[in-house]
Amino acid sequence: MSQWPEYAEKYLMNTVKRLPLTIVRGEGMRVWDDAGREYLDFVGGWAVNSLGHCHPAVVEALREQGRLLIQASNQFYTIPQLQLAELLVQVSCLDKVFFCNSGAEAGEGAVKLARRYGKLHLNGAYEVITTTNSFHGRTLAMVAASGQKKFQEPYTPLPAGFINVEYDSIEAIKKATSPSVCAVMLEPIQGEGGVNIPSDSYFREVRAWCSEKGLLLILDEVQTGIGRTGTLFGYEQYGVEPDIMTLAKGLGSGVPIGAIMAKNRAAVFSPGEHGSTFGGNPLACAVAYAVVKFALENNLAANARRIGDHFMRGLTGLKQKFPLIREVRGRGLLIAVEFKKESASEVVLKCLENGLLVNQVKPNAIRFVPPLIVSEGDVDQALDVLGKVMAQVS
Ligand SMILES: *Cc1c(COP(=O)(O)O)cnc(C)c1O
């Protein structure tokens, strides 16, 4: 091990348990540590590096825009922001965009937009129904939105206005609906909560209920958006359209950017009601534009579906061989393996020792969110390592 973990101990706030690995370089599906050792990356910067590491399209956009204009503020028009907005509107069911810098910030803005809508059109309704085990980010309001006690308890009292109900239960949403509710906010698939996939009818029923009651449906596509689950956006797989959608993670393939998108009728902000200093800056927008263009032109969503299916078949084979595996679940390249015991940290460490990076999503589950450019050969290499590790751990 290098000296860097000591630096972390000495200089960084202690918010996360890091693995004993210092990454200095990345290219495509692979990263290298400070001793020059190579790793196959199935973490992808936490579902962020959609085009892999240092993709030429990303590097080129950074270089070109970096020479031209990096930041100008939203007091002026800047072209990359407008081009990215047009592209996102063209490829989605939404009409308007607001750019910010992260997933949590997009969620905050989406809730502000829903509250604004509530004041204008729903007699001041302001509460937002969200689900247990959801994850919407780490700001105070998004911690209140995320129905997970471990994120909430250290920070009480939390901002009011969120009702956490069971996921995949239309009855729970109906029961929580009252005249003070303005919106329902859901992930198409719960990502950080353990890759939880709802039943087929859930989103159709939620959509119908929101339409009947006049509530806004906010979909948090921060993790599922930009091809991750096998379609460009997760909502496409359920045959529903949100009124508001948030994006971040994969949108910039590593450059920080978030977005709130809305249907015209829900895009009710007026000047001065919301804003951001860095949001929509030319650098991040130029990169995101290159990322979305590349994803569309190379149909990375279809690649996510095809390679994801191949990966799921291989993992299901491992499940038949190793009884320690309770379940394999996923869509596209958002996949989890759940164990019968709390073996996740041991599996993650052993994978690391064998040159494969994977993510622990729960004490008893690991998650795979590799770049969308991943190939069948990369998956086979990962399956080899996983087979070896499972044999050791079982
Ligand atoms: C990661 C994530 C967020 C938070 O994004 P940050 O960029 O870390 O603020 C919000 N929602 C979902 C669904 C996420 O997966």
Image (cartoon, rainbow, N blue to C red):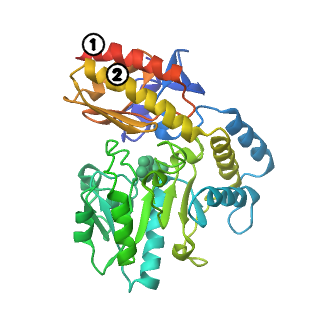
Name the amino acid type tagged 1. Answer: Gln
Q: Position of residue 127 (x, y in %)?
A: 33, 73
- Which label is found at residue 349? 2
Q: Position of residue 49 (x, y in %)?
A: 55, 37
Q: Position of residue 129 (x, y in %)?
A: 32, 66
Q: Is residue 347 above or below residue 250?
A: above
Query: Quick check: is the Cβ at mark 1 less than 8 Å away from ligand 1?
Result: no
What is the C-alpha distance between the residues marked 1 and 2?
Answer: 12 Å
Task: Tell me the residue at 33%/26% (across/down).
Answer: 316
Task: Tell me the residue at 64%/47% (across/down).
Answer: 292
**Looking at the image, which is closer to me, 109 or 175?**
175
> Would you say residue 189 is visible in this rendering?
yes
Ranked by sequence position, the earlier of labels 1 and 2 is 2
Position of residue 331 in the picture relative to residue 247 (left or right):
left
Mark 1 — residue?
392
Is the residue under label 2 in contact with that under label 1 (CB below 8 Å)? no
Q: Position of residue 369 (x, y in %)?
A: 45, 35
Residue at the far bottom: name it: 123
